[in-house]
Image: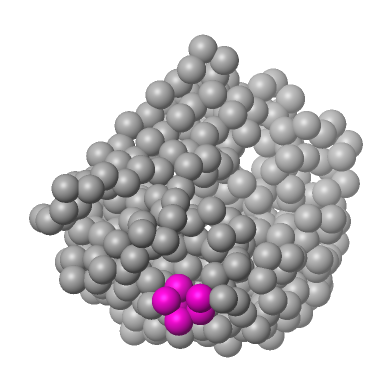
Amino acid sequence: MQQGRQTIIDLLNGTVSWPPVVVPFGLDPFGWHGEQESYRDVCDFALDYCTLLPKVYPVSDPLYVGKGKTEVISDTETRLDGTRIRRHELRYKKRTFSMEETQTPGDSSWMVSKRWIENEEDFNFFLGMDDLPPAEPEIEKVRLKVCQVGEHGLPYVEIRDAFSIVCQMLPTVTFYIKTVTDFDRLSHLISIAAERVLYIITRLCRETGSLFILRLIGAELAVPPFMSRRDFLRFNEDFYTEAARIARDCGIPAAVHCHGPVREIAGDIWQMGFSIMEPFEPPPRGNLTIAEALSLTNSRGIVLGGVDDVLLNTGDCQAVRNAVQQCLDGARNTGKPYILSQSATPFFDPLSERAKENLLLFMKLGTAG
């Protein structure tokens, strides 16, 4: 199979062939990765042989609350041990709220170390911010990324879903207690965020004038073991269904970014109208084999993933061979659209020699089928 933009379009239209489409998840030779010397070989191979789905962020405001009456200031500090601290401040009506995220050396994810809402007074204050206009998306930034990617693939336009925004506003334990003890007020705060996010999605889908993939971030916060399927749907179904409808009406494919055990909600994702579920993680982090995940699509969408990114960072070549082979064997004869990818974007600098060797091997094996 040829790789590139057209292969994604073909999969979305139901054309399935072999070898599979291979995507080095989130790799961006036109952005951060292309600027790092340690990623040069990986970027060069991906540009020649793979399909690219790099990410673009059309809204920088972590709360999507808009401008005008509010001011959001963000900055990042790198400490001597390599730990990165990202701070955000929201100023509104003479009050200042703050949130802090931490990224430790060797870990590509950001962990929230300080939340916006620390007490009931803060919670009530945010509930009273329902009159603020939503943020405006940076549409030109999306258009530029579409042009950069060209025939190599399509950009992911990454948007945090309403549930994710509110979930990270409160301490985790407090949030989940409120899902039981303070459901109405918590739902109202989520609906405020949902209105703002849907406004942004509508503008992006209607006005960008280019094909991209709308990527909703946040479902991994809602599936078991964090929440039951019932509660996941109670908080997310209406928002997800509407987001997917807006995208579909504009001819834009929509993806749900969801780690971990997705068995309980996989069918719901397709029922809500999404085109892609990613990044599928095999056991033990996930609870589905690739064959089971593809079967659950019932030809309604594309499963992307299959290789745990931790394996690429820490495993040896034989372990990578085995993991890719399991994916290929599981997907080969299903007749379902599938994209082979790792489960997270590499953001280590410099990229270790082991990780580089494993990434290159993963891409070579996948494109060979």
**Between 356 and 88, the one nearer to me in the picture:** 88
Measured from the top left, where is residue 360 in percent x and y?
A: 68, 34
Q: Is residue 245 visible?
A: yes
**Between 268 and 295, the one nearer to me in the picture:** 268
| 264 shown above or below 80 | below
**Residue lying at 18% horizontally and 71% vertically, measured from the top left:** 131
Q: Give the residues drawn in magenta, as a range.
A: 182-187
Q: Position of 369 compared to 93: left or right?
A: right
Farthest residue toward the top? 80
Q: Image quadrant for the C terminus?
A: bottom right
Q: Position of 182 compared to 67: left or right?
A: right
Measured from the top left, where is residue 180 in percent x and y?
A: 60, 76
Measured from the top left, where is residue 5 in percent x and y?
A: 45, 58
Measured from the top left, where is residue 252 in percent x and y?
A: 38, 73
Image color mode: one colour
**Residue lying at 44% horizontally and 51% vertically, measured from the top left:** 118
**Between 7 and 354, the one nearer to me in the picture:** 354
